[in-house]
Structure formats: C-alpha cells, structure tokens
C-alpha cells in the first residue's frame, strides 16, 4: 500500500453503440459516489471509464478479437492495483471488471496490493459466465450503502456539499457548505498561473502544489472562483452547491 491510498472505480457496459445509455449514466452517477464515500480525499479517486466495451478476455475470446485484457487502460489499472496504489476497487458489480476468468487477475492483483472490492450490487449468479457470485466486502454492506446513498441524495437535493472538501477548502460550521481554508490562496495561484499559460511543472515549482493536485484544482476551478468577486475580494463564507 502506498503512503496515500487511492480509490479506483470502473465503469463499463457490454453491448450497444451509444456511449450515453441509461445504464452508463446510472453507473457514472452512482459508482463515483461510492468511490468518494470510501476515501477522505477528493483528489485520491481515479477512474477507468470504458463506456461500451467487451468484458471478455483471452480466456474466452480469440487472440485477435476485441478483449478487455487487450485494453491498456485496464491492464495498467490492474498493475497499479498490484503495486498497492489502491485501497478500494469500486464498480457497479464484479461483471463490470470482467465477464470471464480475467476477474481472477483483478483478484490476484488486489490480494498482492492489499486492495478491497466494493460493489454497488451483487451480480445475478445466472448472468455470470464464471458462475460465482461475488460479495461486497463485509464493511460495505449493501443495506448500509443504500442508506448512505439515500442520505447523499437528500443533501444533494438541498444543494449541500456531499464530498470531502477539495484541497484549499473546508466545511463551514454546519458541515453543509464549503468555505476557504488552509491553502486556498495557493489554489487561486494555481488557477491564475494556468490561465496565464504556465506549465504544470512551473506551477508546481512556484506554488508547492503537486502537479496532479494542481490539475484537479484547475479542472474544478469554479469551486474556488465562486469565492472571489471581480475586484479580487475573497469572501470568507459562500454556499457552494453540490453540483458546482
């Protein structure tokens, strides 16, 4: 396990030509929530979104056929799991990771890397080509997860912040909204420098913010700039909605 354990989530649908199906939209809504509920750091969540992609591997497909184990995004993720990068591997169910014996490769890597699986649902036994029903790890029981997601949805409908506070921000006293915290001005500096065309390396050297974190800050710059008016004045408290 690395010093800063991360969480990986995987999204995949087996059939179809549309990359925006109801199934994929549901996975993309629910699975990241579970991943983020399992980590204390918004920036410690990685994803492998395969869209429409086969779940079969060399175990059940010809060498030249489209295979999940021929996708470098998948094989790289499995290697990172083995290397101990991740604490959790999250998916809708185990068939999103593989629909044949390639799932054993995920299990092997998780065992070696000390990672645990967390699935939103248990797959139907009859639908599994490998014929084994995987269980959600003991500490992530389905009924508890559903209660957590229900509470999450209630807060989202009320416009409250549902995730761990991003770098440089913190919860207000009610733990409903965000406000500037330690490192907030460094986050603004990251955004300003990137807007000016500075490289990630230069930004990291100047601000002391790691490049990967700086990218995440810039990708979600609206969460930070909402606290700044046109004159550059920073408000100490400003409700930030859940969908900011």
Image: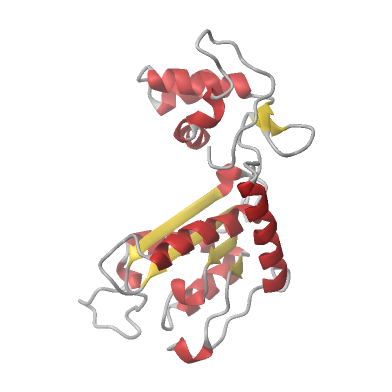
216 w.r.t. 124: above or below = above
137 w.r.t. 19: above or below = below
Looking at this view, name the residue that lies furthest to the top: 231
Q: Is residue 179 visible?
A: yes
Looking at the rendered image, the quarter that the N terminus falls into is: bottom right
Position of residue 63 in the picture relative to residue 80 (left or right): left
Q: Quadrant of residue 115?
A: bottom right
| x, y percent for residue 125 | 52, 89
| x, y percent for residue 83 | 53, 59
Residue nearer the viewer, 239 or 194: 239
Residue nearer the viewer, 42 or 206: 42
Looking at this view, name the residue that lies furthest to the front: 158
Q: Is residue 3 visible?
A: no
Position of residue 150 in the picture relative to residue 131 (left or right): right
59 w.r.t. 20: above or below = below
Looking at this view, name the residue that lies furthest to the right: 173
- Colour mapping used in the image: secondary structure
| x, y percent for residue 21 | 35, 64
Residue drawn at x 41%, y 64% as measured from the top left? 24
Label count reads 0
Residue drawn at x 25%, y 67% as measured from the top left? 17
Residue drawn at x 52%, y 86% as measured from the top left? 124
| x, y percent for residue 25 | 43, 60
181 w.r.t. 216: above or below = above
Q: Quadrant of residue 119?
A: bottom right
Residue nearer the viewer, 110 or 238: 238
């Amino acid at each position: 396990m690395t010093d800063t354990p991360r969480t990986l989530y995987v999204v995949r649908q087996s059939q179809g030509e549309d990359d925006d199906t109801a199934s994929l939209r549901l996975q993309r809504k629910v699975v990241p929530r579970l991943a983020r509920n399992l980590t204390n750091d918004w920036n410690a969540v990685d994803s492998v979104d395969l869209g429409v992609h086969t779940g079969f591997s060399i175990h059940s497909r010809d060498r030249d056929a489209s295979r999940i184990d021929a996708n470098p995004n998948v094989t790289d993720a499995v290697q990172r799991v083995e290397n101990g990068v991740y604490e959790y591997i999250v998916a809708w169910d185990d068939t999103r990771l593989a629909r044949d014996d390639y799932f054993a490769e995920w299990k092997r890597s998780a065992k070696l890397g000390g990672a645990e699986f967390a699935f939103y649902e248990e797959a139907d036994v009859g639908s599994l080509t490998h014929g084994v029903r995987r269980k959600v790890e003991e500490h992530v029981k389905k009924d508890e997860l559903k209660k957590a997601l229900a509470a999450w949805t209630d807060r989202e409908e009320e416009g409250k912040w549902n995730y761990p506070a991003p770098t440089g921000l913190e919860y207000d006293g009610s733990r409903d909204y965000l406000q500037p915290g330690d490192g907030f001005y460094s986050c603004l500096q990251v955004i300003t420098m990137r807007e000016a065309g500075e490289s990630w390396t230069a930004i990291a050297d100047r601000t002391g913010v790691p490049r990967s974190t700086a990218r995440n800050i810039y990708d979600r710059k609206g969460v930070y700039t909402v606290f700044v008016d046109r004159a550059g004045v920073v408000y100490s408290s400003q409700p930030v909605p859940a969908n900011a």
